[in-house]
Image (cartoon, rainbow, N blue to C red):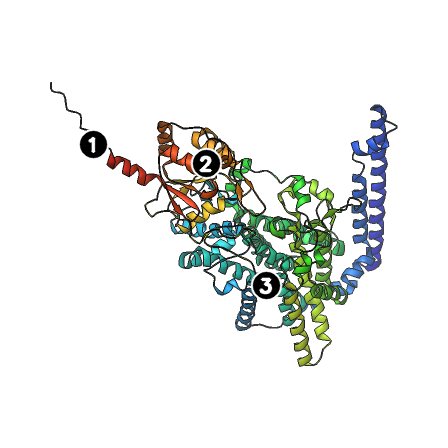
Amino acid sequence: MSEPTRNRNANRLSLIVLLGLAIVSLLWVGAAFYAARHSGSVGAPTAVRHSLHLHLLKYLWLLSVVVVMLLRPEFRKAVWGREDDLDLAASTQAKPEPEGWGKRAIVFLLYAVLAFVFTLPNSIHPSQALLGRGGDNYLHAWFLWEFARALAHGQNPFHTNLILYPIGANLTWATTDILGQIIAVPFSLLLGPIITYNLSLVLQLALGAFFARMLCLRVSGSAVAATIGGIVFGFSPFLLAHALGHLSLITTFPLPIYVLALGRLLDKEKPSWKDGVLLGLALALVALGNYEYALIFVLFSLLILAVDLGRAGFPLLKRVWMPLATSAVIFFLCLAPILLMMLKDYAVTKPAPFENATAYSADALSFFVPSLGQSLLGGYVRKLPAHFFVGPGGIEGVEFIGLAALFFALIGCWAARGYQRRWAGRALVAGVVFALLSLGPTIHVLGKAALLLPAPAAPFYKLSVMRFLREPARLSIATTLCVSLLASIGLTFVLGKLNILWKRSVFACAVGAIVVLEYLVFPFPSSSVVEPNHSWVPPTTAQRCTLPPSIRDGTVLTIPLDDSWHFNDAMWMQMIDGGRYSLIDGRVSPYIPGKAWDDFVDKTPILAVLNSESQGDRFTRDGSVQSRASASSALPPVSEKLAAEVVKQLDLRAVVVFDAPERPADVNYVRDVFGASEKMVGDCAVFDLAQNQDAARESSPARPKPSTPRR
């Protein structure tokens, strides 16, 4: 199709879109005033506007303007270059520098060293501390350990009976990192849970940078520029912030692989079903790393497809619909076992509320502000308003791109030609769109809602599928990948202007050093391996809470029960003890425990009392507990017979009271109910019920055997 014909078709389609929207708007307004007249509120235009959602019209007009802009030939030329450049894209495709396995190994070693440096000083002694700020890092360490333990015992790794006795937990609804768990199995079996978690974190950072480099190398053709592009993505402040506690969110190496497979399918003149198979397998890898990332990059794919449709028109659909359908089939086949387990317990899940999207949105200025822990500027950043960063410890609000990366990304947008131009257009559109989506339904500036500024992404968060993205700020992972791609293109252009080798080397080293300094967090936070604690609470004891080796094969009751601040203590104790017993308590996601476990607790007398008592606990800013029971309340007495029935029903071997010095009422309650005495292990009061039962049987006089009556 010639360029004049394309221009005429674009003009016609633009006119059709605008006229159609104008007609829809007139009908909408007419229907609104007709409804208002019959409702008796003709003189209340404000009520009419709100009652019939006339404000949605502005989003329809905004969408139509975007569509018309994408259709305009001027936009296509600005983003993708001349039409003849696009038609000859195959011949102008950047040819990556040839690399052998030896060079790739050296590059990966470089990224591994950088990951080691970024997690200093505790990466030097991986067995003495748990990398990350106290919180979800303990939970992810438990996930790695439990997955390897289940495989070693020939059990289903996606369902566990070690927690939430007697219901168990469906781990497919947990924030697990299945791909990372598979990789970590050898480490878990040989090195133990603490070293395994720390090595997994370092390894995932290095792998993310390595595969991002592969994508950048494919597009830019420059190994040096691609190496820096890998640093921009793999060690971005977004990933380093989530490395403080969200191991599944730093398992990002499947993302560049998926984008490579998507580009391979879209760029081919005649893509085959094999390309669809590769794309489906890549998306399955993304989902095994993190479910949210899979949904994000499905949206990413739809956006890239729309962008390419604006360039190539509908003939593109004729080429790619079959491979895309094949990829969807392969994806669902690969994840069928997991999806079936998820559907089994789908009733216990619920989308995040709309308010959650507002609370966990990125700030409009967060893309230009370093993280709280940044080595050079972190002290100044901490002076910003408290609500600028969201989430525990400000993890969710870190979207910093880096000034150097942004500078070269802008050069890449301007300087890209040919095949690079096509990728630059995709990355530019996708990066901007996902940055807007990460702002959530309400734009925030310096932590305050800017109600006068309409949020472009607000209509999308009305869709139910978007509610499963519980934290909109995480959508910026796509923006980070796009910026790394554009930065590698810009660096390739600048390096091409330097003809002398030593100048190119010095320039590349200087840019790499600037990027590292912009992203570096030193010291990288770590957590105690003795007592799970939160980031602002120092450990109160040097003795780890463990149970005697005699306690095994039964259950252990931990107090407080069903408490979001203490389930880490219980699961960490179980992991250190090697999983010898099951826990009545436990928590692995916002959806688990579910209604079945709640009903079981409510119907079990002693558990119901303890559960209601635990809900009264409060925590001060320094992390100390103020227990309602320890202050004034008197827990109801329980008969000895009922306590014995509960012990038998639960197969209860021990009771553990965490923070025992601050919970005297809980300790007294366990003494009275179970007739047991405690042993202090650090801050824990351990009641060995099995030992007390054995001692009671030994101290009681032997009963004479009944005589057999004579006939």
- Density class for disc 3 (Cα within 10 Å; few <14, some 14-19, many ≥20) is some
Classify 10 Å Cα crowding around label 1: few (below 14), some (14-19), many (20 and above). Answer: few
Which residue is most to the top? 711
Separation of marks 2 and 3 at Cα, in angstroms: 43 Å
What kind of residue is marked 3?
Answer: Phe
Let me know if residue 647 appears in the view. yes
Residue ID for mark 3 = 522
Tag 2 residue:
665
* Residue 524 coordinates in the image, percent (x, y): 57, 60
**Image mark for residue 702:** 1
Q: Is residue 268 visible?
A: no
User: Which residue is depicted at the point 45% across and 49% down?
Assistant: 572
Q: Secondary structure at mark 2?
A: helix
Task: Tell me whether circle 2 and circle 1 mark residues in contact (CB < 8 Å).
Answer: no
Classify residue 35 by image quadrant. top right
Position of residue 319 in the picture relative to residue 154 (left or right) = right
Q: Residue furthest front?
A: 632
Residue 137 versus residue 166 in the image, above or below: below
Counting residues from the start of the chain, the first of labels 2 and 1 encountered is 2
